Image (tube, coloured by chain):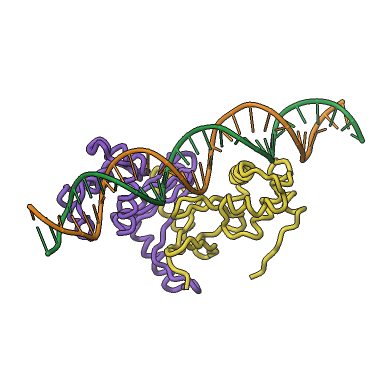
Chain colours: A purple, B yellow, C green, D orange
DNA sequence: TTTCTAATTTGTATTGATTCCAGTTTAAAA
DNA sequence: TTTTAAACTGGAATCAATACAAATTAGAAA
């Protein structure tokens, strides 16, 4: 697996292109996503606090809300109810561990195509699908 | 759509068969699921409070936990993070409205079969799937 | 039936995530 | 620069959910 770290410039660009002001807090939150795996708001706060002392937890929540609204970040629903976040890259699904709170990404373009074609043929009356997400529940070995 | 209401006897039986004591609170919670659509704990509390005054919110949470552990009820993850509950019937998925908090069931045995066969052929390394759930995100019309 | 006990319920206190809001600061446009 | 709308801060408030210790009760056993 190749990990491509985004530069600060690239991050700043993506924030700016969404019509948002480029603040150190926002850049740092975006950077935190490079280090953390499906983090909760609190984990992001702790991580970002290292580079921005005096950071307010409220700011992290504000930023996450804004990023979610802009589609730069997605919320990941969890069994426990605590919200987790995911920096959006390619379309993907999630594998949930049934015996811990571990969550991992699952990429499968072939499956996405099958699902897309399936729902093109078989429309649901009264509901327009915009996105299909799979939750694979199971155990990591 | 045919709605089959469970009798109190049937509910009591299913509770008892799970090795749980049949209490008025548990029966009433199960009955509440017949009336409510993917309710939150608080909605169940309000509904059940009508028939059992003096009911404690804690009891509702306790009962829901027990029922989830026994597989009689399932948790439904929501975008906002507030937990919702679903009395288990046949295997089904969920349609989430992107512009409100509406959630509806989606039954599709044909699709379930396609997915099951797909993942029988294509195993995921290091992960054993036990259940597949679809989240259909979109708009109700 | 009555007794007994572990399971269940209750109620209050508490936690913990998230939001609200009013005041301050700041990015970036003019 | 100057300006100002946008963003950030911090403390209070909210709300779902949990902890816990005491009271009650379902249902097994006598």
Q: Give left or right: position of B26 versus B9.
A: left
Q: Position of residue B95 (x, y in %)?
A: 48, 63
Dividing the picture into quadrants, the one containing residue B109 is bottom right
Q: Is residue B118 left or right of residue B19?
A: left
Q: Quadrant of the N terminus of chain B?
A: bottom right
Q: Position of residue A136 (x, y in %)?
A: 45, 51
Asked if residue B70 can be seen in this view, the reply is: no
* Residue A95 seen in the current view: yes
Relative to B6, does residue A37 appear above or below in the rendering?
Answer: above
Report the residue at 39% width, 63% height from top: A131
Q: How many marks?
A: 0
Nearest to the observer: residue D21 or residue B76:
D21
In the image, what residue occupies the spot 66% across and 59% down?
A: B34
Task: Say which quarter of the image contains residue A93.
Answer: bottom left
Looking at the image, residue B14 sits to the left or right of residue A96; the answer is right
Answer above or below: position of B7 versus B129.
below
- Along the line of sight, the residue nearer the viewer: B2 or A82: A82
Residue A82 in percent (x, y) is at 44, 45
* Residue drawn at the location 70% of the way across and 64% of the way down: B4
Residue B98, given in percent of the width and then of the height, sits at 42, 63
Residue B20, relative to residue A87: is it above or below?
above
């Amino acid at each position: 697996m190749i990990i491509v770290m985004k530069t600060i410039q690239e991050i700043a660009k993506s924030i700016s292109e969404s019509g948002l002001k480029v603040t150190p807090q926002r850049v740092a939150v975006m950077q935190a996503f490079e280090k953390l795996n499906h983090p909760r708001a609190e984990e992001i706060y702790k991580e970002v606090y290292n580079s921005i002392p005096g950071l307010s937890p409220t700011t992290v929540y504000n930023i996450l809300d804004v990023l979610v609204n802009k589609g730069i970040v997605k919320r990941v629903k969890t069994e426990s109810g605590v919200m987790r976040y995911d920096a959006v890259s390619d379309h993907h699904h999630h594998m949930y561990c049934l015996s811990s709170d571990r969550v991992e990404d699952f990429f499968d373009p072939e499956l996405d195509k099958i699902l897309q074609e399936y729902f093109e043929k078989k429309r649901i009356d009264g509901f327009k699908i915009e996105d299909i997400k799979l939750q694979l529940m199971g155990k990591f070995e």
